[in-house]
Image: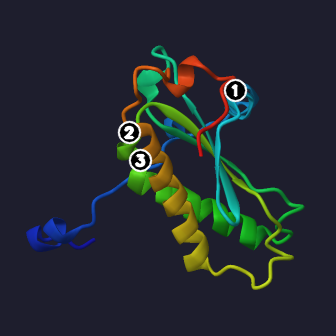
Protein backbone atom coordinates (compact mmCIF):
# COMPACT_ATOMS: atom_id res chain seq x y z
CA UNK A 1 0.00 0.00 0.00
CA UNK A 2 1.41 3.37 -1.00
CA UNK A 3 1.16 6.31 1.35
CA UNK A 4 -1.07 9.20 0.32
CA UNK A 5 0.86 12.40 -0.25
CA UNK A 6 -0.27 15.74 1.18
CA UNK A 7 -0.78 17.08 -2.36
CA UNK A 8 -3.24 14.36 -3.36
CA UNK A 9 -5.06 14.74 -0.05
CA UNK A 10 -5.57 18.46 -0.75
CA UNK A 11 -6.93 17.74 -4.24
CA UNK A 12 -9.33 15.03 -3.12
CA UNK A 13 -12.94 15.92 -3.98
CA UNK A 14 -15.31 16.80 -1.19
CA UNK A 15 -17.44 13.82 -0.19
CA UNK A 16 -21.21 13.94 0.00
CA UNK A 17 -22.22 10.61 1.52
CA UNK A 18 -25.72 9.15 1.27
CA UNK A 19 -26.16 7.14 4.49
CA UNK A 20 -29.37 5.40 5.43
CA UNK A 21 -30.53 8.25 7.69
CA UNK A 22 -30.91 10.44 4.55
CA UNK A 23 -33.30 7.93 2.92
CA UNK A 24 -37.00 7.28 3.17
CA UNK A 25 -37.27 3.55 3.81
CA UNK A 26 -40.64 2.80 5.40
CA UNK A 27 -44.03 2.61 3.73
CA UNK A 28 -45.48 5.09 6.26
CA UNK A 29 -42.81 7.65 5.34
CA UNK A 30 -43.65 7.35 1.64
CA UNK A 31 -47.40 7.49 2.38
CA UNK A 32 -47.08 10.67 4.41
CA UNK A 33 -45.24 12.43 1.57
CA UNK A 34 -47.70 11.26 -1.09
CA UNK A 35 -50.60 12.15 1.23
CA UNK A 36 -49.34 15.72 1.58
CA UNK A 37 -50.08 16.18 -2.17
CA UNK A 38 -47.34 18.66 -2.98
CA UNK A 39 -45.36 18.01 -6.14
CA UNK A 40 -43.28 19.74 -8.78
CA UNK A 41 -43.62 18.29 -12.26
CA UNK A 42 -40.97 18.04 -14.94
CA UNK A 43 -41.06 16.41 -18.38
CA UNK A 44 -40.01 12.99 -17.03
CA UNK A 45 -40.15 13.20 -13.22
CA UNK A 46 -42.34 14.34 -10.34
CA UNK A 47 -40.77 15.58 -7.13
CA UNK A 48 -43.14 15.09 -4.18
CA UNK A 49 -42.30 16.85 -0.92
CA UNK A 50 -43.43 17.36 2.66
CA UNK A 51 -41.94 19.66 5.28
CA UNK A 52 -41.05 17.76 8.43
CA UNK A 53 -42.43 18.46 11.86
CA UNK A 54 -40.13 19.97 14.51
CA UNK A 55 -39.61 16.51 16.04
CA UNK A 56 -38.44 15.14 12.69
CA UNK A 57 -36.37 18.22 11.84
CA UNK A 58 -33.18 16.91 13.38
CA UNK A 59 -32.87 14.32 10.60
CA UNK A 60 -32.66 16.97 7.89
CA UNK A 61 -33.66 16.38 4.28
CA UNK A 62 -34.38 12.79 3.22
CA UNK A 63 -34.95 11.24 -0.20
CA UNK A 64 -37.11 8.37 -1.44
CA UNK A 65 -37.12 7.03 -4.99
CA UNK A 66 -39.91 5.41 -7.00
CA UNK A 67 -38.92 4.03 -10.40
CA UNK A 68 -41.53 1.54 -11.54
CA UNK A 69 -40.86 -1.43 -13.76
CA UNK A 70 -43.86 -0.48 -15.90
CA UNK A 71 -42.17 2.80 -16.82
CA UNK A 72 -38.65 1.45 -17.37
CA UNK A 73 -38.41 -2.26 -18.06
CA UNK A 74 -34.62 -2.60 -17.99
CA UNK A 75 -33.05 -2.74 -14.55
CA UNK A 76 -30.05 -0.88 -15.97
CA UNK A 77 -32.30 2.10 -16.74
CA UNK A 78 -34.04 2.02 -13.35
CA UNK A 79 -30.72 1.85 -11.54
CA UNK A 80 -29.33 4.70 -13.65
CA UNK A 81 -32.27 6.94 -12.70
CA UNK A 82 -31.79 6.11 -9.01
CA UNK A 83 -28.05 6.70 -9.18
CA UNK A 84 -28.53 10.09 -10.89
CA UNK A 85 -31.14 11.11 -8.31
CA UNK A 86 -28.99 10.11 -5.34
CA UNK A 87 -26.03 12.03 -6.74
CA UNK A 88 -28.05 15.19 -7.37
CA UNK A 89 -29.57 14.97 -3.88
CA UNK A 90 -26.17 14.45 -2.24
CA UNK A 91 -24.83 17.58 -3.91
CA UNK A 92 -27.83 19.75 -2.99
CA UNK A 93 -28.88 18.27 0.36
CA UNK A 94 -27.35 21.09 2.42
CA UNK A 95 -29.62 23.60 0.57
CA UNK A 96 -32.81 22.04 1.99
CA UNK A 97 -34.51 22.49 5.34
CA UNK A 98 -35.95 19.41 7.06
CA UNK A 99 -38.04 18.03 4.21
CA UNK A 100 -38.95 14.58 2.94
CA UNK A 101 -38.66 14.21 -0.84
CA UNK A 102 -39.76 11.50 -3.23
CA UNK A 103 -38.54 11.54 -6.81
CA UNK A 104 -40.88 9.52 -9.00
CA UNK A 105 -40.54 8.64 -12.65
CA UNK A 106 -43.67 10.08 -14.25
CA UNK A 107 -43.54 8.84 -17.85
CA UNK A 108 -42.42 5.68 -19.56
CA UNK A 109 -38.78 5.95 -20.61
CA UNK A 110 -39.33 2.96 -22.89
CA UNK A 111 -41.98 4.83 -24.93
CA UNK A 112 -40.38 8.30 -24.80
CA UNK A 113 -39.43 9.60 -28.25
CA UNK A 114 -36.62 10.53 -28.25
CA UNK A 115 -35.39 8.65 -25.22
CA UNK A 116 -33.78 11.07 -22.74
CA UNK A 117 -30.02 10.88 -22.35
CA UNK A 118 -28.26 10.46 -19.05
CA UNK A 119 -27.27 14.15 -19.10
CA UNK A 120 -30.86 15.26 -19.78
CA UNK A 121 -32.21 13.18 -16.91
CA UNK A 122 -29.49 14.43 -14.54
CA UNK A 123 -30.19 18.04 -15.55
CA UNK A 124 -33.94 17.63 -14.99
CA UNK A 125 -33.47 16.03 -11.57
CA UNK A 126 -31.03 18.75 -10.48
CA UNK A 127 -33.41 21.41 -11.85
CA UNK A 128 -36.38 20.03 -9.91
CA UNK A 129 -34.33 19.99 -6.70
CA UNK A 130 -33.19 23.59 -7.31
CA UNK A 131 -36.77 24.72 -7.98
CA UNK A 132 -37.96 23.16 -4.74
CA UNK A 133 -35.03 24.61 -2.80
CA UNK A 134 -35.87 28.11 -4.07
CA UNK A 135 -39.59 27.60 -3.35
CA UNK A 136 -38.90 26.54 0.23
CA UNK A 137 -36.44 29.40 0.75
CA UNK A 138 -38.73 32.23 -0.43
CA UNK A 139 -40.46 34.06 2.41
CA UNK A 140 -44.21 33.70 2.74
CA UNK A 141 -46.40 36.73 3.31
CA UNK A 142 -48.37 36.99 6.55
CA UNK A 143 -51.69 36.07 4.91
CA UNK A 144 -50.51 32.64 3.74
CA UNK A 145 -49.49 30.02 6.29
CA UNK A 146 -46.40 27.92 5.52
CA UNK A 147 -47.07 24.77 3.44
CA UNK A 148 -46.82 22.41 6.43
CA UNK A 149 -49.55 24.27 8.34
CA UNK A 150 -52.21 23.94 5.65
CA UNK A 151 -51.88 20.64 3.74
CA UNK A 152 -55.34 20.94 2.12
CA UNK A 153 -54.46 24.18 0.30
CA UNK A 154 -53.68 23.79 -3.40
CA UNK A 155 -50.06 24.18 -4.44
CA UNK A 156 -49.16 27.60 -5.90
CA UNK A 157 -47.93 27.41 -9.47
Residue 99 relative to residue 9: left or right: right
Real-space CA distance between mark 2 and mark 1, rounded to the nearest whole angstrom:
24 Å
Comparing labels 1 and 3, the label whose residue is closer to the camera:
3
Secondary structure of the residue carrying tag 3 is helix
Comparing labels 2 and 1, the label whose residue is closer to the camera:
2
| Residue 49 position within the rendered picture, expressed as x and y whole percent measured from the top left | 60, 38
Quadrant placement of the N terminus: bottom left
- Label 2, residues with CA under 10 Å away: few <14, some 14-19, many ≥20: few
In this orientation, which residue lies closer to the viewer: 77 or 92? 92
Real-space CA distance between mark 1 and mark 3, rounded to the nearest whole angstrom:
22 Å
Residue at label 1?
A: 32
Residue at label 2?
A: 138
Q: Is residue 78 above or below residue 20?
A: below
Real-space CA distance between mark 3 and mark 2, rounded to the nearest whole angstrom:
6 Å
| Residue 97 position within the rendered picture, expressed as x and y whole percent measured from the top left | 41, 34
Residue 109 relative to residue 119: left or right: right
Q: Are marks 3 and 2 in contact (CB under 8 Å)?
A: yes
Residue at label 3?
A: 134
Residue 80 in view in this figure:
yes
| Residue 66 position within the rendered picture, expressed as x and y whole percent measured from the top left | 73, 50
Please report whichever mark, 1 or 3, sits nearer to the chain's N-terminal start: 1
Amino acid sequence: MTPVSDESRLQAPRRFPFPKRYRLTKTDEFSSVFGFRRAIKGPYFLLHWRLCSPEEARQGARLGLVVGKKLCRASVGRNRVKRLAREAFRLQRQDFPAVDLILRLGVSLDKAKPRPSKAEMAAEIAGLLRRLSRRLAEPRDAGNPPPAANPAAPEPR
